Image: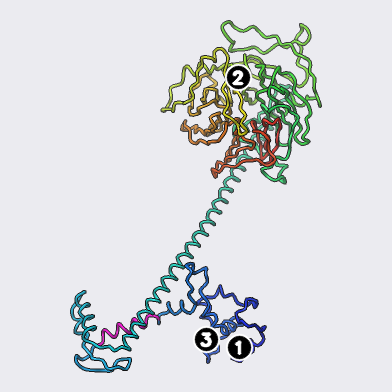
Amino acid sequence: MATATAAASNRPSSSNPLDASHNSISFRKLNFTTLGRVGLGVGRRTVSSSRDLEIFEATDELLALPISSSILDNGEDISLLRGFNATIPSSEKGKIRRRRMRNIDFDLGSEGRGEAGQLVKTATFAAGMKGKGKGARKKSRESLGKSVRLGRDELARQRNEILLDKENLHVRRTLIHSEISEIARKIAALDAVRERLEGDLMKLQEDELELDDELEGVEERFTYEEFNTSRPSSVSTSTLSSRSSRRRKGPAFLPSEHDSIPPGVAFMTLSSHTASISALDFSEPYGLLVSAGSAEDSSTRVWDLREGEEIGRLIGHAGSVKCIQVEEHFCMTGGTDSNLRLWDLRLVAENEVESKKLDVIHEPKEEGGENTKANGPTIRQGGDEPQELKGPCVKLLEGHSKAVTALYFEEECLVTGASDKTIRQWDLNTGQCVQTMDILWAISHPPRPMSPQPRSSFMFTPSDTYTGTFAVPTPPYSDGSWDMYQDFVGGVQFWGYALVSGSGDGAVRMWDMRTGQAHRTLLGHTAPVTCLQFDEHHIISGSLDKSIRIWDLRMGNNSETLRYDHPVTSLQFDTRKIIACAGENGVKIYNRTTMQHSALTTNGHDQPAERLRYMDRYLVTGGRDATVKVWAL
């Protein structure tokens, strides 16, 4: 005790021994175990630390403190001592004493002195317990109430003991309810931890998919370099890159030079166009971008994405360009003049604004329609003798009779779709059209479905298409504007002999390029298909019906549908995400792993975005505000 007194004299003086300013004891962490460490007996020397001394000195105050609100959440104020007394074994001694009293044998008619000191008339209770069951128990209680006098003091004592037992039960019940609430809170906290860990697993899965894509891109480039090394070098402008599978499988990942840029922000704006952007594509992050303006602009511009400057223009189309594909330094364009042009971007002169006019003389077509094996065009420039094309345009392909609205090429094979309702396959080495696939014929002769297919509610009436007219009003964009949609073929893509197209009748068709026949038609869209892409497992298509549909190639059906508020005009996807222009100023992103939707809006377009293309984490979009935006994903 002397030690305790000395320790107490060394503490700062305070009117409240439990003053929080001492910061030496945390009452919220005290419990029965903490108090049990302290020897409360006067004659025993069990104090072993300064903390134990403080607990010992503040015993009365501690025992009077209510149990922490983190344990009790029902608003009751139960002191620590009260909770302790209600849960220790000695709290049952009153019940045990009363139970023993009922089982004591007394001589019937004799008198004895009870525990309270009063005279009571005794009875033999054991005699009443010889029977079994409820009847015997009832008889014994009746004999206790009628035959035995316990006295006022004993009855008062038993009443107080019973009330105390009831109060103890209430305290225990409160503590149990509070413990259940505490467990519920812990479960909720664990659920939150589990959700966070599941999110981490999702992120690891996305990282693994990204590494798979990166490895695939590196292997493709390695194979391409080996192929170029093993064959004789050639300077022919018709030798095209084989690294275009990024459109089928997703981007071939490249070292990101924009890792320091905040994600989800448009960090560059290209704004020299004077009308909405009708098409765009780029070679690689910070490489060359080609963008085209709509009818009011009709210019096709080449940009250096590292400097953010226009370096030249592609002049040759008599009208606006509707579709573009860029692979390394080659660019293919299709325009409203029904022509296709192949450009060598290395030959683009800085600030080029003029080009000599080219007179193109074509071979006569067969009677009764377009020839299915079109010869390459003969180019004449200012005279009767054939001359080679000058400037960046290295090849001119003609065969379609209306606007070329979709194209896709890999190596020396090119497939195009046009508003003349045909799809053409071209040999880029010879410039010849090697095959024509008629969509109207495919509509009139649908393939026999392997399984029942839903019937599209979009009623396509081809009566006007034979006269050459096709126009559908688009649903309003987010700003209330709308257009007349006239692109009968919204998208084409092939892989090997497998070709997929999306058209104005709302159908997604799968073609066999060896036979030129459509062998499967996927129905579900209720308006023209404006864009599509496919990989080994899925076809993903966007439509004016404000939806994106994900088709399972293995099952041949629609496995998932994404709904939007406005028409979908452009999309691209990989194994982790789908990015789409859906009639809003921002760009829509759907995470295929977590199934979560998000949007890019920061520093974005002032009017709806309509075109996009991305590679790595580098995204380029074109909008109705005549600007091109470059984003970090």
Amino acid type for the residue under numbered disc 1: Ala
**Residue beneath the point at 44% across and 26% down:** 455
* Disc 3 element: loop
Q: Which residue is mark 1?
A: 4
Location of residue 48 in the rendering, given as x and y in whole percent from the top left corner: 58, 84
139 to the left or right of 494: left
Q: Which residue is mark 2?
A: 418
**Residue beneath the point at 73% across and 22% down:** 237
Name the quadrant containing residue 158.
bottom left
Location of residue 350 in the rendering, given as x and y in whole percent from the top left corner: 81, 27
Q: Nearer the viewer, residue 377 or 14?
A: 14
Quadrant where the C terminus is found in the figure: top right
Q: CA distance from mark 2 to mark 3?
A: 96 Å
* Disc 2 element: strand
Colouring: rainbow
Name the quadrant containing residue 454.
top left
Q: Is residue 54 something that shows in the picture? A: yes
* Disc 1 element: helix
Name the quadrant containing residue 413.
top right
Q: CA distance from mark 3 to mark 1?
A: 12 Å
Q: Nearer the viewer, residue 73 or 488?
A: 73
Q: Earlier in the sequence, mark 2 or mark 1?
A: 1
Residue 421: give its label.
none
Amino acid type for the residue under numbered disc 3: Leu
Q: CA distance from mark 2 to mark 1?
A: 98 Å
Q: Which residues are magenta?
A: 91-104
Q: Which residue is mark 3?
A: 40
Amino acid type for the residue under numbered disc 2: Ala
Asked whether residue 93 is drawn in magenta, I would say: yes
